[in-house]
Amino acid sequence: MNLAVISHTEHYKRPDGTIVGWGPTVTELNHLLEVFDTIYHVAMLHDEEAPASALPYSSDKIVFISLPALGGQSVGDKLKLVWKSPEVLRIIRQTLKKVDWFQFRSPTGIGMYVIPYLTFCAKTPGWFKYAGNWNQTNPPLGYRLQRWMLKRQSRKVTINGHWENQPEHCLTFENPCLTTSELQQGEVLNKQKSFDGQLTFCYVGRLEKPKGVERIIQAITELSDGEKEQIKVVHLVGDGPDKAAFMTLAENSGVSFIFHGFLSRGQVFEIYKESQVFLMPTTASEGFPKAIAEAMNFGCMPVVSNISSIGQYIKHKETGLCLSEVTVAELTAMIRVLKSIDMNLYHNILNNQRPIVDKFSFKHYNNRIIAEIIKLA
């Protein structure tokens, strides 16, 4: 049984010719080989140096099929998206002839014409994966139209969170990010972690204002000198156009910030292991960021926004801390709340997180794909 995955996932060619792609998606597809014999990944190839977070596929049973690199906000980018549509659809049409199932990952620019094509022209069984905020009130026009189209076609759609009036064919699915071995490591580590003394904070994601990086720096800057002494270090993992400005802002914070740039999956997990607190005061169009589940697995207390489906998993002082408002003042206040959390409450929160974390395992995800999408006996 073969699968075509169609996405906008960034891929790159290393100097030795190896194709690598965005780590979380590559890892997910590696594990999907437990369900499918061969996976054809139709995705975008960029003519740039690969970041450290990009990974090669673990098997030659995953075949990369390149699309032109499309996307962007300029008028030229939008025109190129339309101009290249015949080429994109031709590549997809040829790939569908080789497979038994497809998965299309949205929202993405090409979704504006790929979703109608798959809905009305493709006879191959398949499903859609909507990775953004399914319940976003005022999404960008392209996101809104893709969500509208997905609600009105009949194939299964996997979404983040559970919502009122959710169509029957739209299934709440957690995005997988953890292996069985990593779950076991997390269980052991959670029993060993301490919340006494200085705390180590971390953030993993794009370094941009909507994700809350500026709010993190500003909120910590607002703390008193005594409160700052209780913070050992703040790790910021990722990259983005605002990185230089954030580095300048952090210089006057009175706390040690380390900007790591992109790191490998293993390096990111090492940072989670040494941290007690994970910060993500985001206002971006989120589903449920995988980084939250990963951080929780390794014993981090999430301090996060109550937006999209995040608040369905992170209950205040039960499985983490949730911001009632996404502001600098609220984040500063929530960081101060951390002082009132003792070891007993910390470990109670970590224990409460385990059933949630388990849902983000590759094993759980694959079992649901088999039972609820493909419906194999």
Image: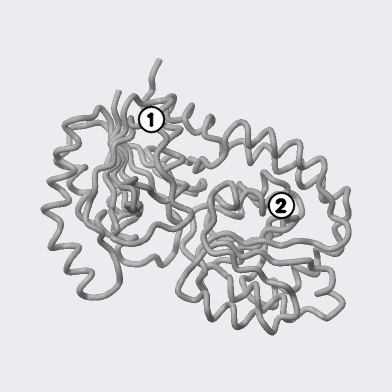
Examine the image and state in which quarter residue 61 appears: top left
Check the picture and name the quadrant holding the C terminus.
top left
The residues tagged by marks 1 and 2 sit, at their Cα atoms, a distance apart of 33 Å
Amino acid found under the numbered disc labelled 2: Cys
Amino acid found under the numbered disc labelled 1: Ile
Check the picture and name the quadrant holding the N terminus.
top left
In the image, residue 140 above or below residue 254: above
Give the percent coordinates (x, y) of residue 155: 30, 37
Examine the image and state in which quarter residue 10 appears: bottom left
Residue at the spot of label 2: 300
Residue at 16 percent across and 32 percent down: it is 97
Work out whether residue 325 can be spotted.
yes
Give the percent coordinates (x, y) of residue 304: 64, 61
Q: Of circles 1 and 2, which is in front?
A: 2
- For this orientation, the residue located farthest to the front is 16
Residue at the spot of label 1: 373
Give the percent coordinates (x, y) of residue 132: 43, 55
In the image, residue 175 above or below residue 145: above
Residue at 76 percent across and 72 percent down: it is 333
| Nearer the observer, 163 or 171 | 171
Horizontal relation, residue 282 to residue 138: left or right:
right
Q: Are marks 1 and 2 in contact (CB under 8 Å)?
A: no
Horizontal relation, residue 175 to residue 80: left or right:
right
Residue at 31 percent across and 44 percent down: it is 104
Horizontal relation, residue 176 to residue 257: left or right:
left
| Nearer the observer, 261 or 209 | 261
| Nearer the observer, 260 or 212 | 260
